[in-house]
């Protein structure tokens, strides 16, 4: 399992509509619909538990461990091409640092021949180089997919190492710059040219004083994979004083070849004057600028955006953060500076989809300042969710560990509310994709009712006690509860017995679970090569419960639509053999593991593999494609006691625990029970049934039948996912800017948000439909006009009413005031009836019946405010109250290469 705990590595990496069974499938109506779908055979072939014939392996003896002098920090493979996955590297914990320990290597898929290659790294150093233990470790490794045999090993000291033969031999090379520590170096390999590297390094002045203004960054380029380096600061000829953020222009990916950017293009944020430099942690700085070089600084760069501080590239778009106190807009025009923007460190985000030629301010429907945010890529890699940690003015909500999730539409600058109160911890958001199923995401949310009465919320409130899990099947447009099972395999996993059915659902630990210390739990997990399978640790109940006796392990075979308990404890899990093998073990916060379990029928039956010694299991890994049947289970020695005689750690004999690894090769373990799949062992599967649509398309994919206990060839290719366009329905749409979901289909105006808060709307370049709906990102349904008649679903007005200015001109004045006259007359008659004719019982009935109408008129009042503002020509400039925190890419920790995230600047580099 790719652990979110890998954030503990200072790794220097930056960071459609799934229609449910019915449009009213919320809460307790979904289980019945699931029963109907299952009985109709819509969820794929199933296996009865009564057919289980489980076995214990090996048939004789136990599986032997591999031990290491210190615990394992990470396991890495040489590339992602399956012919090279036999080369496995293990990074150990260092003595002085958490990372930077010894490097071990196996060229037999981990099955044997493990070698500590640190002696080879030492031998490769030039005479006189330091051989101290804290300078010889490995922090990270880098390679290009086209040349996986050539790997750069980044060390914490003044040297790094390069191999040209998968790690058999090594060459030591000095870090670029003068006395540059590898711990302070950030590397990026060119996407298209494998020999080219960019490296941002701290200057030698940082060794003397990290707080000095002279402690700045240089950017170096190598065209021979690190043998020789050129300082681009010097090459700029005085036009650049220091660098801050950087990336290759070729990181932009376009489906249109004509938009492809040249390989020589580099984007960066720079100080152009030495007098402007403010040290390695300047905060938001108006003297940093976003620039572009088209020729590797052979000539002067082009300043694209004044005050541009940090940026991130996602698909064909650039997301750029700049301080709100900047007096200049990206197009060079004067912009109004919000009051207090400089004092509070306010930030504004801009987006570009034309190779950073032009930028538009990102519009979020919010009035609060922002403290930070994450970017999470959509499944197609072309869009992103922005998860914002707002600076709420209310003291209760401001101290709550929560963020707000916003979804981008066709226009990446126009965001709409997706999920409020998304739980976060240590700059990590509990929000993740369900891989392989576009539009499906899972998240954890703080319950809204705990904020209803601020006086009842104590200052030391444990917000973790009020987490609830949610899932969306249509790109964040609608969120629902996770459905608890109707029956349980383990009675202990049913914690709903004493709760009303409406208050009891399934809740699962998310990415924050990795960093909960002694109460850590694995995150919900899925893999692109195991479509439909999701595993997680959690519990049923009203809220997520971190207690060990409350936690079970859960499995979904249909992308999160239904769930089953598969263990009465918290397990760690991984998928292999293209999803046909599930491997689990007790997680380290549970009892030590004396065995591991594997299933060949998607969790219905579990076989046992006995281990020679017990261990505290930290993680289970498989090569990145998830195609192999060789798993690596790793952790550390568990403490020996009378109750745990198979544990090996004795504190009286050793001061530290050793790292322990088991290589579980299922083919070797099963021996003659191993069977290769044939064509009849596969089925065509549609998630979650044959009559459902996924982002506007009926999707079918190939997978092995649950009842076929056989194995795929490692090079087996799943037949390409097919899709047939669906007719547009309400599930293909999300609420437009300034509106939020009420129930399943209607949208109401958000309190205090005006369309004129967004420049794209006030200028007429973006049209908000009168239906308050727009298409979900990457939704391909046909017949938009079946649902939205005045828009193309992407922000463009259609129809005769549009006219100039996208239909917002003065031609609407007459209709607008006729509406006001009629509305006023109806309201007057209702008030007279209420005051003089209605009885108390009639009033009570009216209040109940008119609740939706009141919400509607609240929305109408917001629309009226917009119309009046627009008709009178009153437009706010620059969306003054939309502020943004910067993206990672310079000093932020990276969670994984698929997600860009932006914690505060990390002070240790």
Image: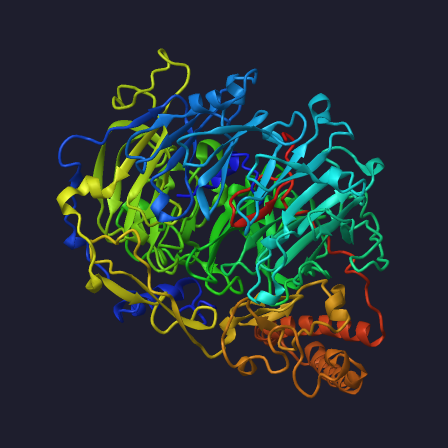
Which residue is nearer to you in this view: 18 or 419? 18
Q: Quadrant of the C terminus?
A: top right
Residue 423 in percent (x, y) is at 55, 47
Position of residue 418 measured from the top left corner of the image (x, y, whole percent): 57, 60
Q: Is residue 520 visible?
A: yes
**Which quarter of the picture shows residue 879?**
bottom right
Is residue 20 shown above or below 543?
below
In the image, taking residue 434 as reference, residue 217 lies left or right, namely right
Rendered location of residue 386, percent (x, y): 61, 54
Q: Nearer the viewer, residue 868 or 41?
A: 41
Q: How is the image coloured?
A: rainbow
> Which quarter of the image is occupied by the N terminus?
top left
Left-right relation of 554 to 544: left
Image quadrant in which you'd find residue 63: top left
> Measured along the vertical axis of the image, is residue 622 above or below residue 637?
below
> Is residue 495 something one can see in this rendering?
no
Residue for point 85% across, 57% down:
336
In the displayed structure, does residue 710 sit left or right of residue 102? left
Determine which quarter of the picture holds residue 230: top right
Q: Residue at (72%, 21%) from the top-left corner?
A: 208
Give the x, y percent position of residue 487. 28, 55
Viewer-side residue, 70 vs 523: 70
């Amino acid at each position: 399992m790719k652990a979110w705990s890998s954030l503990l590595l200072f790794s220097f990496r930056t960071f459609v509509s799934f229609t449910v069974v019915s449009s009213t499938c919320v809460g307790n109506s979904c289980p019945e619909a699931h029963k109907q779908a299952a009985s109709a055979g819509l969820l794929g072939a199933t296996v009865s538990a009564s057919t289980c014939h489980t076995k214990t392996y090996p048939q004789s003896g136990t599986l032997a461990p591999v031990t290491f002098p210190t615990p394992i920090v990470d396991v890495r493979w040489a590339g992602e091409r399956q012919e090279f996955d036999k080369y496995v590297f293990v990074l150990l914990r260092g003595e002085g640092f958490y990372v930077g320990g010894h490097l071990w290597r196996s060229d037999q898929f981990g099955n044997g021949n493990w070698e500590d290659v640190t002696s080879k790294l030492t031998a490769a150093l030039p005479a006189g180089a330091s051989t101290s233990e804290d300078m010889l470790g490995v922090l990270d490794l880098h390679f290009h997919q086209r040349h996986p045999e050539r790997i750069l090993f980044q060390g914490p000291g003044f040297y790094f190492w390069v191999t040209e033969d998968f790690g058999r031999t090594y060459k030591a090379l000095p870090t670029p710059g003068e006395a540059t520590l590898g711990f302070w170096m950030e590397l990026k390999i060119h996407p298209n040219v494998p020999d080219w590297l960019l490296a941002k390094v701290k200057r030698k002045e940082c060794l003397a004083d990290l707080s000095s203004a002279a402690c700045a960054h240089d950017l170096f380029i190598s065209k021979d994979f690190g043998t020789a380096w050129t300082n681009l600061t010097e090459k700029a000829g005085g036009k650049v004083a220091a660098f801050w953020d950087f990336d290759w222009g070729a990181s932009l990916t376009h489906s249109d070849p004509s938009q492809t950017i040249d390989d020589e293009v580099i984007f960066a944020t720079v100080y152009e004057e030495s007098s402007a430099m403010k040290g390695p942690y300047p905060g938001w700085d108006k003297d940093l600028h976003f620039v572009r070089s088209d020729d590797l600084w052979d000539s002067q760069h082009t300043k694209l955006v004044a005050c541009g501080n940090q940026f991130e590239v996602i698909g064909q778009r650039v997301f750029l953060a700049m301080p709100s106190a900047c007096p200049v807009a990206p197009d060079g025009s004067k912009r109004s500076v919000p009051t207090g923007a400089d004092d509070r460190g306010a930030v504004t985000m801009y987006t570009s989809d034309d190779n950073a030629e032009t930028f538009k301010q990102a519009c979020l429907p919010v009035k609060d300042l922002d403290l930070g945010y994450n970017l999470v890529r959509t499944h197609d890699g072309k869009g992103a969710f922005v998860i914002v940690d707002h600076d709420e003015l209310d003291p209760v909500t401001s101290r709550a560990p929560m963020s707000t999730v916003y979804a981008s539409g066709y226009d990446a600058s126009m965001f709409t509310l997706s999920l409020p109160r998304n739980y976060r911890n240590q700059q990590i958001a509990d929000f993740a994709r369900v891989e392989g199923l576009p539009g499906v995401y899972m998240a954890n949310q703080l319950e809204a009712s705990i904020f209803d009465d601020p006086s009842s919320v104590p200052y030391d409130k444990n917000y973790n006690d009020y987490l609830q899990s949610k899932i969306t099947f249509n790109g964040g447009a609608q969120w629902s509860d996770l459905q608890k099972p109707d029956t349980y395999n383990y009675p202990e996993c049913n914690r709903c017995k004493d709760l009303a059915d409406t208050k009891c659902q399934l809740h699962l630990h998310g990415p924050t679970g990795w960093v909960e210390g002694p109460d850590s739990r694995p995150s919900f997990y899925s893999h692109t090569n195991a479509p439909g399978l999701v595993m997680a640790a959690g519990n049923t109940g009203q809220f997520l419960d971190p207690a060990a006796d409350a936690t079970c392990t859960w499995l979904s075979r249909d992308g999160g639509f239904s769930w089953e308990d598969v263990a009465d404890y918290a397990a760690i899990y991984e998928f292999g053999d293209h999803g046909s093998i599930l491997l689990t073990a007790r997680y380290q916060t549970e009892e030590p593991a004396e065995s591991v379990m594997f299933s060949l029928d998607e969790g219905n039956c579990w076989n046992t593999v006995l281990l020679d010694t017990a261990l505290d299991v930290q993680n289970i890994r498989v090569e990145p494609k998830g195609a192999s049947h060789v798993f690596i289970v790793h952790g550390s020695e568990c403490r020996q006691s009378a109750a745990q005689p198979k544990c090996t750690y004795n504190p009286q004999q050793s001061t530290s625990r050793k790292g322990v690894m088991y290589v579980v090769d299922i083919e070797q373990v099963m021996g003659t029970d191993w069977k290769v799949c044939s064509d009849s062992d596969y089925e065509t599967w549609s998630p979650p049934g044959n009559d459902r649509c996924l982002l506007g398309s009926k999707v079918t994919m190939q997978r092995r039948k649950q009842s076929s206990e056989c194995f795929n060839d490692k090079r087996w290719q799943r037949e390409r996912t097919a899709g047939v366009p669906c007719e547009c329905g309400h599930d293909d749409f999300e609420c437009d800017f300034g509106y939020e979901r009420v129930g399943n289909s209607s949208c109401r105006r958000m309190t205090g948000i005006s369309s004129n808060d967004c420049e794209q709307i006030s200028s007429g370049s973006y049209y908000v439909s009168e239906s308050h709906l727009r298409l979900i990102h990457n939704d391909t349904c046909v017949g938009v006009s079946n649902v939205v008649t005045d828009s193309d679903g992407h922000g463009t007005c259609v129809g005769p009413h549009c006219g100039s200015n996208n239909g917002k001109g003065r031609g609407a004045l007459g209709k607008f005031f006729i509406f006001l006259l009629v509305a006023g007359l109806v309201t007057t008659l209702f008030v007279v009836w209420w005051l003089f004719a209605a009885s108390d019982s009639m009033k009570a009935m009216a209040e109940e019946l008119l609740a939706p109408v009141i919400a509607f008129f609240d929305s109408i009042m917001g629309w009226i405010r917009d119309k009046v503002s627009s008709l009178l020509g009153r437009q706010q400039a620059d969306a003054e109250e939309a502020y943004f925190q910067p993206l990672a890419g310079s000093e932020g920790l990276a969670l994984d290469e698929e997600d860009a995230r932006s914690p505060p600047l990390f002070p240790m580099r």
